Amino acid sequence: MASQFYERNTSGMNADRFMARLTDESTVNTMQRHYWTARQFIRTKLGKKEDEHLEASDIELDTCLNLYRSVHGTSFQLLNNVDNYANFLLDETLVQNVLGKYLKEKGKIDKTVAVGRILIAVGRALLFSSHRLNAARIGVSTFYNKLSVFVERAIGDCSQTIEAVQMCRTEYRGSLLWMKKTSEELDPEVDGSMEKFREAQTTVKSNKERLDRLKTDTLQKVNLFIPFIYTTFL
Amino acid sequence: MSYAYLFKYIIIGDTGVGKSCLLLQFTDKRFQPVHDLTIGVEFGARMVTIDGKQIKLQIWDTAGQESFRSITRSYYRGAAGALLVYDITRRDTFNHLTSWLEDARQHSNSNMVIMLIGNKSDLEARREVKREEGEAFAREHGLVFMETSAKTAANVEEAFIDTAKEIYRKIQEGVFDINNEANGIKLGPQHSPSSPNSPGGNATGGLGGGSGCC
């Protein structure tokens, strides 16, 4: 979890380790930020309900995430099924082909002319059908290739964004909890109370900017699925 | 600067109705067409003189965005006045007033003075909510109503100052207990006993004594 968390937060480049020192965030501040993220994470894991306004503000993203999950799940199933179908088609083609050849051969050496003719005719039909099946199989495997590119590239790429947006949302909601806590004691006339609030506010602000960007990314990427699905499947 | 009273105000309403602009116009007398989204809350303060007394208005400009709604609720605590703002060019901001009012009534003290404000009155051409509708809503819920424009500064001063006057009147009538900070009213750091009405001493029986509230 720890390493995953690190990787989601940075580009994975070694330089990122030193970036923290360039920003003027204090250690205490960093700790607080992580504390509230962790707290939100646990809240989510425990299945605590968020308040309805927060949920409502994320409804677009949630619809998008649901669409993604459904596309993700069904695409993988479809890929599996198409793969199986192509394999069975191949088996069928081979069996028909071999059987057709066998029947033709047997038909030629059959002593009763009528039976021989029938055997040859059936054999030919089977051979013809096997060629047809093979042609169909090519279509199916082209579809399989297209679909697997979609699954690997589009869905694979999107899943990274989705992971990032979900992580960012946890951070954002965590910082909201933090800001709420500092808001309860907030009094601009009292020294120190403002600073605490400002720290939380700055974090909320940067998290919000990041989340908004990622939200747009997610929406755009998931919306790109739809034209693809139309052109490929319909 | 010394003051006799400090009133805590809160500005609430949907996102983009011009809450921050109203505050900016009131405190700095300027208008900024593009404003950053308020995160949580921002503050403003200004001194006004009412009845010869210096009153400091401490204004909490809250975020209107939906995701901050539960945080905004914690700012109602201890507010003496609230400006409930809607945008006259956007019908939905008017429709949400009931839910804002409900929130305000639930999370603040019952004596809080609420002023209903229809902002952006300079955009007459794009008006979607009639002035009469605002008036009717205010009458129905017992609020004071005003249409303002943060851009042209029309009625902005009046909105804040009338609210302050109303709070001051309530203090004079003894509705507000000024020794209870939960009411959003604080006494100034120094009280000269020169004025008989000044709530100089908690010891002398405090406010309302000389004002003849009965």
Image (cartoon, coloured by chain):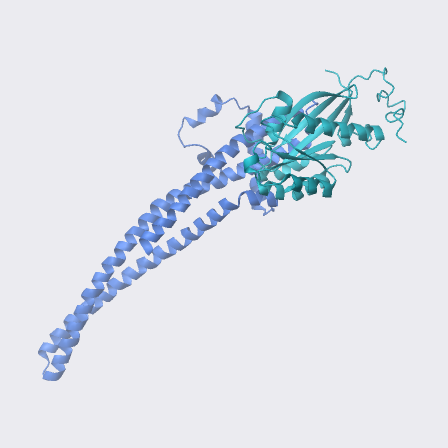
Q: Where is residue A87 in the image (x, y as percent from the top left)?
A: 28, 60
Viewer-side residue, B123 vs A191: B123
Viewer-side residue, A167 vs A109: A167
Q: Which residue is drawn at 21% across and 61% down?
A: A135
Work out whether A98 lies above or below B32.
below
- Total of numbered circles in the picture? 0
Viewer-side residue, A167 vs A71: A71
Q: Quadrant of residue B12?
A: top right
Q: What shade does chain A have?
A: blue
Work out whether B182 lies above or below A231.
above
Q: What shade does chain B have?
A: cyan
Q: Where is residue B75 in the image (x, y as percent from the top left)?
A: 68, 33
A191 left or right, relative to A60: right
Viewer-side residue, A99 vs A114: A114
- The quadrant of the image that shows the C terminus of chain A is bottom left
Q: Quadrant of residue A81?
A: bottom left
